[in-house]
Image: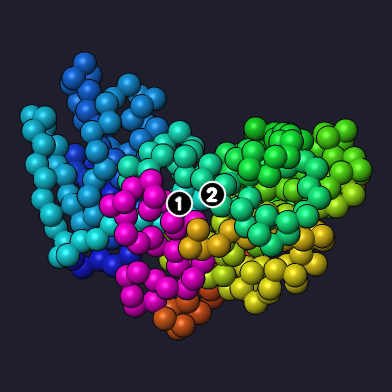
Amino acid sequence: MKQCQGGFSVIALVVGVGLIAFRDSHGIRPLVFGHSSTKNGHIFASESVAIDTLGFDFLRDVNPGEAILVDFNGQVHTALCAESPTLVPCLFEYVYLARPDSVVNKVSVYQARLKMGVSLAKRIQKLRPNHGIEVVVPIPETSRPSALECANVLQVPYRDALIKNRYIARTFIMPGQSLRQKGIHLKLNPIKPELEGKCVLLVDDSIVRGNTAKEIVQMVRAAGASKIFFASAAPPVKYPNVYGIDMPTFSELVAHNHQEEEIAGILGADWVIYQELSDAEETIKSLNPEIKALESSCFCGEYVTGGVNKEYLENLQKNRNEDRFSTGKTTNSIIDLLV
Protein backbone atom coordinates (compact mmCIF):
# COMPACT_ATOMS: atom_id res chain seq x y z
CA MET A 1 0.00 0.00 0.00
CA LYS A 2 2.91 2.35 0.70
CA GLN A 3 4.16 1.77 -2.84
CA CYS A 4 0.88 2.65 -4.57
CA GLN A 5 -0.61 6.08 -5.25
CA GLY A 6 -4.17 6.63 -6.37
CA GLY A 7 -7.66 5.52 -5.47
CA PHE A 8 -8.37 1.84 -4.91
CA SER A 9 -10.34 -0.69 -2.92
CA VAL A 10 -9.02 -4.24 -3.09
CA ILE A 11 -10.52 -7.55 -1.99
CA ALA A 12 -8.44 -10.72 -2.41
CA LEU A 13 -8.59 -14.33 -1.33
CA VAL A 14 -5.12 -15.46 -0.24
CA VAL A 15 -4.62 -19.22 -0.48
CA GLY A 16 -4.03 -20.75 2.93
CA VAL A 17 -4.46 -17.40 4.71
CA GLY A 18 -7.94 -15.93 4.29
CA LEU A 19 -9.86 -12.99 2.85
CA ILE A 20 -8.11 -9.63 2.87
CA ALA A 21 -9.43 -6.17 1.97
CA PHE A 22 -7.69 -2.82 1.96
CA ARG A 23 -8.35 0.75 0.89
CA ASP A 24 -6.21 3.62 -0.37
CA SER A 25 -4.79 6.08 2.16
CA HIS A 26 -7.28 8.82 1.21
CA GLY A 27 -10.36 6.61 1.14
CA ILE A 28 -11.14 7.84 -2.36
CA ARG A 29 -12.90 4.66 -3.39
CA PRO A 30 -15.46 3.17 -0.98
CA LEU A 31 -15.13 -0.15 0.83
CA VAL A 32 -17.41 -1.55 3.54
CA PHE A 33 -17.34 -4.49 5.94
CA GLY A 34 -20.19 -6.67 7.20
CA HIS A 35 -20.93 -9.80 9.22
CA SER A 36 -23.68 -12.37 9.66
CA SER A 37 -23.94 -14.61 12.70
CA THR A 38 -26.57 -16.78 10.99
CA LYS A 39 -24.45 -17.22 7.88
CA ASN A 40 -21.32 -17.51 10.03
CA GLY A 41 -19.28 -15.27 7.78
CA HIS A 42 -17.96 -11.84 6.85
CA ILE A 43 -18.43 -9.78 3.70
CA PHE A 44 -16.66 -6.89 1.96
CA ALA A 45 -18.24 -4.73 -0.76
CA SER A 46 -17.89 -1.35 -2.40
CA GLU A 47 -21.37 -0.31 -1.23
CA SER A 48 -23.50 -1.06 1.80
CA VAL A 49 -26.46 -2.05 -0.39
CA ALA A 50 -24.69 -5.31 -1.29
CA ILE A 51 -24.40 -6.17 2.39
CA ASP A 52 -28.06 -5.38 3.00
CA THR A 53 -29.46 -7.36 0.07
CA LEU A 54 -27.38 -10.46 0.88
CA GLY A 55 -28.73 -10.54 4.43
CA PHE A 56 -25.57 -9.49 6.27
CA ASP A 57 -25.26 -6.82 8.97
CA PHE A 58 -23.28 -3.71 8.13
CA LEU A 59 -20.39 -3.21 10.55
CA ARG A 60 -18.43 -0.22 9.27
CA ASP A 61 -16.43 1.35 6.47
CA VAL A 62 -12.90 0.09 5.97
CA ASN A 63 -10.82 3.08 7.05
CA PRO A 64 -8.43 4.88 4.71
CA GLY A 65 -5.10 3.04 4.61
CA GLU A 66 -6.51 0.11 6.60
CA ALA A 67 -6.21 -3.60 5.81
CA ILE A 68 -8.60 -6.17 7.27
CA LEU A 69 -7.86 -9.89 7.16
CA VAL A 70 -10.49 -12.52 7.93
CA ASP A 71 -8.66 -15.81 8.40
CA PHE A 72 -10.12 -19.26 7.74
CA ASN A 73 -11.02 -19.57 11.44
CA GLY A 74 -13.24 -16.50 11.14
CA GLN A 75 -10.91 -14.30 13.19
CA VAL A 76 -10.65 -10.66 12.13
CA HIS A 77 -7.27 -8.92 12.07
CA THR A 78 -6.82 -5.22 11.30
CA ALA A 79 -3.76 -3.11 10.58
CA LEU A 80 -3.11 0.48 9.54
CA CYS A 81 -0.75 0.24 6.58
CA ALA A 82 -0.40 3.86 5.48
CA GLU A 83 1.27 6.86 7.03
CA SER A 84 -1.03 9.76 7.99
CA PRO A 85 -4.20 8.48 6.28
CA THR A 86 -6.96 11.04 5.72
CA LEU A 87 -10.53 10.54 4.57
CA VAL A 88 -11.00 12.40 1.26
CA PRO A 89 -13.79 10.48 -0.52
CA CYS A 90 -14.74 10.91 -4.17
CA LEU A 91 -17.53 13.45 -4.69
CA PHE A 92 -18.63 11.74 -7.91
CA GLU A 93 -19.64 8.65 -5.91
CA TYR A 94 -22.43 10.70 -4.35
CA VAL A 95 -23.30 12.53 -7.57
CA TYR A 96 -23.59 9.53 -9.89
CA LEU A 97 -21.81 6.26 -9.19
CA ALA A 98 -23.32 4.93 -5.96
CA ARG A 99 -26.81 3.51 -5.64
CA PRO A 100 -29.23 5.83 -3.78
CA ASP A 101 -29.96 3.17 -1.15
CA SER A 102 -26.29 2.92 -0.18
CA VAL A 103 -24.52 4.58 2.73
CA VAL A 104 -20.99 5.62 1.79
CA ASN A 105 -18.62 6.92 4.47
CA LYS A 106 -21.57 7.31 6.86
CA VAL A 107 -23.43 9.44 4.30
CA SER A 108 -26.77 8.36 2.84
CA VAL A 109 -26.44 8.76 -0.92
CA TYR A 110 -30.17 9.45 -1.20
CA GLN A 111 -30.07 12.19 1.42
CA ALA A 112 -27.01 13.71 -0.25
CA ARG A 113 -28.84 13.92 -3.58
CA LEU A 114 -31.91 15.43 -1.93
CA LYS A 115 -29.77 18.16 -0.39
CA MET A 116 -28.07 18.77 -3.74
CA GLY A 117 -31.53 19.41 -5.15
CA VAL A 118 -32.22 21.99 -2.46
CA SER A 119 -29.02 23.92 -3.11
CA LEU A 120 -29.60 23.71 -6.86
CA ALA A 121 -33.09 25.22 -6.48
CA LYS A 122 -31.73 28.03 -4.33
CA ARG A 123 -29.15 28.81 -6.99
CA ILE A 124 -31.90 28.93 -9.63
CA GLN A 125 -33.90 31.33 -7.44
CA LYS A 126 -30.83 33.51 -6.95
CA LEU A 127 -29.80 33.70 -10.61
CA ARG A 128 -33.30 33.79 -12.14
CA PRO A 129 -35.97 34.82 -9.60
CA ASN A 130 -38.65 35.03 -12.31
CA HIS A 131 -37.68 31.73 -13.87
CA GLY A 132 -41.10 30.82 -15.26
CA ILE A 133 -40.48 27.08 -14.86
CA GLU A 134 -43.74 25.11 -15.20
CA VAL A 135 -42.53 21.56 -14.70
CA VAL A 136 -39.41 19.84 -13.34
CA VAL A 137 -38.41 16.64 -15.14
CA PRO A 138 -35.59 14.34 -14.01
CA ILE A 139 -33.38 12.51 -16.47
CA PRO A 140 -33.62 8.98 -15.05
CA GLU A 141 -32.50 7.44 -12.86
CA THR A 142 -29.79 9.07 -10.77
CA SER A 143 -31.13 12.61 -10.81
CA ARG A 144 -34.57 11.81 -9.40
CA PRO A 145 -33.93 12.71 -5.73
CA SER A 146 -32.29 16.02 -6.69
CA ALA A 147 -35.04 16.88 -9.18
CA LEU A 148 -37.78 16.03 -6.67
CA GLU A 149 -36.38 18.27 -3.95
CA CYS A 150 -35.57 21.00 -6.48
CA ALA A 151 -39.24 21.00 -7.55
CA ASN A 152 -40.38 21.15 -3.92
CA VAL A 153 -38.26 24.21 -3.17
CA LEU A 154 -39.29 25.94 -6.41
CA GLN A 155 -42.93 24.98 -5.73
CA VAL A 156 -43.25 23.65 -9.27
CA PRO A 157 -44.85 20.32 -10.33
CA TYR A 158 -42.52 17.33 -10.61
CA ARG A 159 -43.17 14.88 -13.45
CA ASP A 160 -41.45 11.69 -14.60
CA ALA A 161 -41.95 12.70 -18.21
CA LEU A 162 -38.99 10.75 -19.59
CA ILE A 163 -39.54 7.01 -19.37
CA LYS A 164 -36.47 4.81 -19.23
CA ASN A 165 -35.96 1.50 -20.97
CA ARG A 166 -34.48 -0.54 -18.11
CA TYR A 167 -32.67 -2.90 -20.44
CA ILE A 168 -30.20 -0.32 -21.79
CA ALA A 169 -26.86 0.29 -20.04
CA ARG A 170 -25.73 3.69 -18.76
CA THR A 171 -24.82 5.78 -21.81
CA PHE A 172 -22.10 7.63 -19.86
CA ILE A 173 -19.92 4.50 -19.88
CA MET A 174 -20.61 3.41 -23.45
CA PRO A 175 -17.52 3.66 -25.70
CA GLY A 176 -17.93 5.72 -28.86
CA GLN A 177 -20.18 8.67 -29.69
CA SER A 178 -22.37 6.88 -32.27
CA LEU A 179 -22.99 4.10 -29.74
CA ARG A 180 -24.03 6.59 -27.07
CA GLN A 181 -26.41 8.39 -29.44
CA LYS A 182 -28.14 5.14 -30.38
CA GLY A 183 -28.27 4.18 -26.73
CA ILE A 184 -30.02 7.44 -25.78
CA HIS A 185 -32.88 6.90 -28.25
CA LEU A 186 -33.29 3.31 -27.12
CA LYS A 187 -33.12 4.38 -23.49
CA LEU A 188 -35.63 7.24 -23.15
CA ASN A 189 -39.08 8.11 -24.46
CA PRO A 190 -40.95 11.35 -23.60
CA ILE A 191 -44.53 11.70 -22.35
CA LYS A 192 -45.67 14.53 -24.62
CA PRO A 193 -48.73 15.81 -22.69
CA GLU A 194 -46.46 16.65 -19.72
CA LEU A 195 -44.11 18.70 -21.92
CA GLU A 196 -46.18 20.36 -24.66
CA GLY A 197 -46.24 24.15 -24.47
CA LYS A 198 -44.39 24.27 -21.14
CA CYS A 199 -41.19 25.77 -19.80
CA VAL A 200 -39.39 22.59 -18.74
CA LEU A 201 -36.54 22.30 -16.25
CA LEU A 202 -34.57 19.14 -17.03
CA VAL A 203 -32.44 17.98 -14.11
CA ASP A 204 -29.53 15.59 -14.58
CA ASP A 205 -26.96 14.38 -12.08
CA SER A 206 -24.13 15.86 -14.20
CA ILE A 207 -23.13 16.95 -17.70
CA VAL A 208 -19.98 15.22 -18.92
CA ARG A 209 -19.54 15.18 -22.70
CA GLY A 210 -22.84 16.94 -23.29
CA ASN A 211 -23.82 14.49 -26.04
CA THR A 212 -26.50 12.77 -23.97
CA ALA A 213 -27.86 16.12 -22.79
CA LYS A 214 -27.98 17.46 -26.37
CA GLU A 215 -29.97 14.46 -27.61
CA ILE A 216 -32.41 14.73 -24.70
CA VAL A 217 -32.93 18.46 -25.26
CA GLN A 218 -33.75 17.74 -28.92
CA MET A 219 -36.14 14.99 -27.84
CA VAL A 220 -37.97 17.24 -25.36
CA ARG A 221 -38.08 20.10 -27.89
CA ALA A 222 -39.63 17.74 -30.46
CA ALA A 223 -42.20 16.75 -27.82
CA GLY A 224 -43.45 20.36 -27.79
CA ALA A 225 -41.70 22.13 -24.90
CA SER A 226 -41.79 25.92 -25.31
CA LYS A 227 -38.57 26.49 -23.33
CA ILE A 228 -35.96 24.11 -21.98
CA PHE A 229 -33.74 24.86 -19.00
CA PHE A 230 -31.08 22.27 -18.21
CA ALA A 231 -29.79 21.95 -14.64
CA SER A 232 -26.86 19.86 -13.44
CA ALA A 233 -26.96 18.70 -9.83
CA ALA A 234 -23.15 18.51 -10.03
CA PRO A 235 -20.62 21.26 -10.77
CA PRO A 236 -19.13 21.53 -14.28
CA VAL A 237 -16.97 18.50 -15.13
CA LYS A 238 -13.79 20.10 -16.49
CA TYR A 239 -10.97 17.64 -15.86
CA PRO A 240 -10.29 13.90 -16.29
CA ASN A 241 -10.56 11.52 -13.38
CA VAL A 242 -7.52 9.34 -12.67
CA TYR A 243 -8.86 7.44 -9.67
CA GLY A 244 -10.84 4.61 -11.24
CA ILE A 245 -13.61 6.39 -13.16
CA ASP A 246 -13.49 6.16 -16.95
CA MET A 247 -13.85 9.92 -17.29
CA PRO A 248 -13.37 11.39 -20.78
CA THR A 249 -10.29 13.40 -21.75
CA PHE A 250 -10.10 17.20 -21.88
CA SER A 251 -11.19 17.40 -25.51
CA GLU A 252 -14.42 15.50 -24.79
CA LEU A 253 -15.55 17.45 -21.72
CA VAL A 254 -18.06 20.09 -22.76
CA ALA A 255 -17.35 22.34 -19.76
CA HIS A 256 -13.55 22.30 -20.08
CA ASN A 257 -13.30 25.34 -22.37
CA HIS A 258 -16.85 26.64 -22.38
CA GLN A 259 -18.93 28.93 -20.17
CA GLU A 260 -22.54 28.21 -19.25
CA GLU A 261 -24.00 30.36 -22.05
CA GLU A 262 -21.84 28.58 -24.62
CA ILE A 263 -22.83 25.19 -23.23
CA ALA A 264 -26.50 26.13 -23.50
CA GLY A 265 -25.93 26.85 -27.20
CA ILE A 266 -24.13 23.53 -27.70
CA LEU A 267 -26.93 21.59 -26.00
CA GLY A 268 -29.68 23.57 -27.73
CA ALA A 269 -31.16 24.62 -24.37
CA ASP A 270 -32.50 28.07 -23.48
CA TRP A 271 -30.49 28.14 -20.25
CA VAL A 272 -27.97 25.92 -18.47
CA ILE A 273 -27.22 26.05 -14.76
CA TYR A 274 -24.74 24.08 -12.66
CA GLN A 275 -24.41 23.32 -8.97
CA GLU A 276 -21.68 25.30 -7.22
CA LEU A 277 -18.74 23.10 -6.17
CA SER A 278 -18.75 24.57 -2.67
CA ASP A 279 -22.45 23.72 -2.27
CA ALA A 280 -21.95 20.15 -3.48
CA GLU A 281 -19.06 19.59 -1.10
CA GLU A 282 -20.87 21.18 1.81
CA THR A 283 -23.81 18.82 1.21
CA ILE A 284 -21.60 15.81 1.96
CA LYS A 285 -19.76 17.44 4.86
CA SER A 286 -23.04 18.41 6.52
CA LEU A 287 -24.13 14.76 6.56
CA ASN A 288 -20.82 13.57 8.03
CA PRO A 289 -18.74 16.22 9.85
CA GLU A 290 -15.83 13.74 9.92
CA ILE A 291 -15.33 14.47 6.21
CA LYS A 292 -13.23 17.62 6.01
CA ALA A 293 -12.42 17.50 2.29
CA LEU A 294 -13.54 15.68 -0.85
CA GLU A 295 -11.78 14.36 -3.92
CA SER A 296 -13.25 16.72 -6.52
CA SER A 297 -10.52 16.64 -9.16
CA CYS A 298 -12.88 16.25 -12.12
CA PHE A 299 -14.52 19.53 -11.09
CA CYS A 300 -11.54 21.61 -9.92
CA GLY A 301 -8.42 19.95 -11.38
CA GLU A 302 -6.75 19.43 -8.00
CA TYR A 303 -5.59 15.83 -7.53
CA VAL A 304 -5.32 14.82 -3.89
CA THR A 305 -2.54 12.27 -4.34
CA GLY A 306 -0.21 14.60 -6.20
CA GLY A 307 1.99 13.47 -9.07
CA VAL A 308 -0.71 14.18 -11.63
CA ASN A 309 0.71 16.79 -14.00
CA LYS A 310 0.11 17.97 -17.56
CA GLU A 311 2.37 15.30 -19.07
CA TYR A 312 0.58 12.53 -17.17
CA LEU A 313 -2.84 13.73 -18.36
CA GLU A 314 -1.66 14.09 -21.96
CA ASN A 315 -0.37 10.50 -21.94
CA LEU A 316 -3.64 9.37 -20.38
CA GLN A 317 -5.59 11.06 -23.17
CA LYS A 318 -3.42 9.45 -25.84
CA ASN A 319 -3.79 5.97 -24.36
CA ARG A 320 -7.56 6.27 -23.92
CA ASN A 321 -8.04 7.50 -27.48
CA GLU A 322 -6.08 4.53 -28.81
CA ASP A 323 -8.04 2.07 -26.66
CA ARG A 324 -11.41 3.46 -27.74
CA PHE A 325 -10.48 3.41 -31.40
CA SER A 326 -9.51 -0.26 -31.20
CA THR A 327 -12.69 -1.34 -29.35
CA GLY A 328 -15.26 1.05 -30.80
CA LYS A 329 -15.83 -0.75 -34.11
CA THR A 330 -16.71 -4.06 -32.49
CA THR A 331 -19.07 -2.52 -29.94
CA ASN A 332 -20.84 -0.38 -32.55
CA SER A 333 -21.45 -3.47 -34.68
CA ILE A 334 -23.14 -5.19 -31.75
CA ILE A 335 -25.46 -2.22 -31.13
CA ASP A 336 -26.31 -2.02 -34.85
CA LEU A 337 -27.87 -5.47 -34.49
CA LEU A 338 -30.22 -4.08 -31.82
CA VAL A 339 -31.59 -1.09 -33.74
Q: CA distance from mark 2 to mark 1?
A: 7 Å
- The answer to whether residue 135 of the structure is visible from this angle is yes
Dot 1 surroundings within 10 Å: few (below 14), some, or many (20 or more)? Answer: many
- Amino acid carrying mark 1 in the image: Thr
Q: Is residue 64 above or below residue 21?
A: below
- The answer to whether residue 329 of the structure is visible from this angle is no
Position in image of residue 119 (x %, y %): 56, 52
Quadrant into which the C terminus falls: top right
Assess whether mark 1 and mark 2 are in contact (beta carbons under 8 angstroms): yes
Position in image of residue 229 (x %, y %): 77, 54
Dot 2 surroundings within 10 Å: few (below 14), some, or many (20 or more)? Answer: many
**Label 1: which secondary element:** helix
Q: Nearer the viewer, residue 326 or 172?
A: 172
Position in image of residue 29 (x %, y %): 35, 53
Residue 302 in magenta stretch: yes
Position in image of residue 294 (x %, y %): 38, 60
Q: Earlier in the sequence, mark 2 or mark 1?
A: 2
- Residue pictured at 14% horizontal, 42% vertical: 69
Q: Which mark is residue 262?
A: none
Q: Is residue 94 above or below residue 145?
A: below
Residue 175 in magenta stretch: no
**Label 2: which secondary element:** helix
Q: Which residues are magenta?
A: 280-308
- Amino acid carrying mark 2 in the image: Met
Q: Nearer the viewer, residue 163 or 284?
A: 284
Quadrant into which the N terminus falls: bottom left
Q: Quadrant of residue 13?
A: top left
Which residue position is annotated with label 1?
283
Q: Which mark is residue 116?
A: 2
- Residue pictured at 58% horizontal, 73% vertical: 250
